[in-house]
Amino acid sequence: MTRHAVSALVAAGDKVVVSDRLGSSSGYQTIHSVEGKVLFQQSSYEQNTEYVWSNSTQRLYSYRNGGGTNEFRYVVVNADGTLGEYRQAPYVSGASFMGPLRISPDGVTVLSGAGHFYDGATLVQNNALANGLLEAVWLESRVYTARQSSTGGKVEVQRWGGPNYGLDATHIISGEFVALRALPSGDMVLVTQRNGTPLFTTLNAGLGSSDSTGGAPPDRLGNLSTRALTVGGEGQLIPGIIISGSQNKKVLVRAAGPVLAEFGVENALADPELTLLDWQGKPVAVNDNWSSATNAAEIASASARVGAFAFPSGSKDSALLLELKPGNYTALTRNVSGSPGIALVEVYDVPDSVASSLVNLSARGTVGQGGDVLISGLIVTGSSPKSFLIRGVGPTLADFKVNGALADPHMRLYRQSEVIQENDNWEDGRPQEVSFVERMASQVGAFPLPAKSKDAAMVVTLEPGAYTVHLSAATGAGGVALIEVYEVEF
C-alpha cells in the first residue's frame, strides 16, 4: 500500500478538495463529491499549506507558508468538478507568502497573514495593514483582525476601515489567542485561553461587549452557560432553571461537546445527550444530536438571535428549544458513550413579549484542578444594572446526600479578564454584608448556608454585559459543586 500525507483539505461548495503528497514533493490534487466519488484528479507538485474557498467566485485559493509569492494561486472549480482558470501571483524577489489566507465575502479582496491585501482576480498586492495577523473576519465594510500582543499574554482585536484600511479601533483581552469567528447575528466571538481555560468574548462591530442581536432588549438575566468536566454519577453536569411569572417562556438549552474542539478545548465531550426534567424529575424533552430535532431550523435561528455560536450541521452537539411553564427545571448532560469530557451547557432566555422571565439559573458539576474548574457564564441584557445573589456551594451539598462534595470552594466573578469580586467563605465579609446575603437568599427561596460553612456567596449589582463565575478548590482535592445565580431586588 502506498501512503499519502494529506497536506490540505477544504469543502468547496458541494465538493471536497484534497491535496496529498507522495514522498517529498510529488502528489495528487483530488476533487470529490460529498458522497466520496472522485470527480477529478491530477498529479501535482504543489505543497499547499491551506486551501480557502470563495463561494462568490468559485475560486479555490492556496499557498505554501514561507514559499515565494508566486506560490499563492487560485484555480476555478467548474460545476462538474474539473478545473478551469488557473492564476499565480506575481513573483517578488526576496518576498515570501505567509498565512492564514482570508477572503472577503464578495470574493473581491484577499488578505494574508502578513497583513497584505490582494486583488481577488489578479492576485496583485494593492494595500497593506500596519501589522500581521493570526485571524481575520469581515463585518460589513470593515476588516477585523486578531493578533497576539507584542507585550505577551494579551490578544489584540483590531478594526480597519476606510479606503486605505486605517486602524480605527482596538480591543485587548488577556490570554492566548485561540479563534475569532463571525456570528450570523453580525457580531464576533473571540476565543482566548488562560491556564488551559477557554474564555468566550462576544464583540460587536464597535469592538464593545455585545450581548444582544439588535434593538433595546429588556433588562433581564439573559443567559447562563456552564463549562465543566462531565463524568458519570454525582459528577454529571446538571444546570438548573427557574422561570417566574404566569405565562410560558421560550428557552434555548444547548449542550456543546465536539464543537468545542474548534475553539481549542481539549478532551471535549464526544457525544452529549441533553435531558430536561421538571421539578418532579419527569423528562420534559430529550435530544442527542441537535440537527436530528424536528425544529432544528428554529434552533439554528434562535441561536443566531441570542448571539450563540453556530453548531455545525450534523454535529453531535445537542440542543432543545421549547416553551416552559413557570417552575423549576434541571438539564442533565451525559456522554452517550459514557466517557468523561469537557462540555459547555448554555441556557438562553429567548426574547419575546411575555411577562415571564428567567430569575434563577444554576449548575452543578465537578470541580478539579486547572482546566477542570467549574465555569458559569451569565449575560445581563438591557440598559440598566441588575442585582444578583451568586453562590458557590460545596460542603453543604453533603446535607442533600451528594457524594464527593467540594470541601472548600473559592469563587471569582470575572468581566472579561478582570476579577471584579471574589469570595472564599460566605461569612468572611462584614456582619452587615453577611446578613444581606442571608436576607437575599431568604427572599428568593434558596436553601440557607450553615454558619461557619466553607461555601462561597456574594451579592453584586452588574451593568449590562457578559460575566463568568469561576469556582475552584481553595484547598485540597476537587469535588462536586453547585453554582447558583439568582436575580434579586432590594
Image (tube, rainbow, N blue to C red):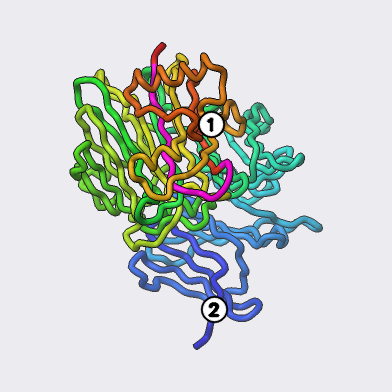
Q: Say which quarter of the image contains residue 168.
A: top right
Q: Give the range drawn in magenta.
A: 474-488
Image location (x, y in percent) of residue 224: 40, 34
Q: Is 483 inside the magenta-drawn segment?
A: yes
Q: To which residue does mark 2 refer?
A: 4
Q: Name the residue under label 1.
A: 425
Label 2: few (<14), some (14–19) or many (≥20) C-alpha neighbours in 10 Å: few
Q: Residue at x 71, y 40 (%)?
A: 149
Relative height, residue 474 to residue 428 (above, below) = below
Image quadrant in which you'd find residue 126: top right
Element carrying mark 2: loop
* Residue furthest out toward the bottom: 1
Residue 95 visible in the snapshot:
yes
Three-letter amino acid code of the residue under disc 1: Asn
Q: How crowded is mark 1: few (under 14 residues within 10 Å), some or many (20 or more)?
A: many
Farthest front residue in view? 451
Is 112 inside the magenta-drawn segment?
A: no
Compared with 280, 4 (above or below) is below
Which of 119/264 is in front?
264
**Mark 1 or 2, nearer chain start:** 2
- In terms of secondary structure, what is the magenta stretch mainly? strand
Q: Position of residue 73 (x, y in %)?
A: 61, 59
Alpha-carbon span between mark 1 and mark 2? 58 Å
The x and y percentages for residue 437 are: 45, 20
Q: Residue at x 52, y 17 (%)?
A: 433
The picture places residue 390, in percent across and down from the top left corner, at 45, 28
Q: For numbered disc 1, what is the local secondary structure?
A: loop
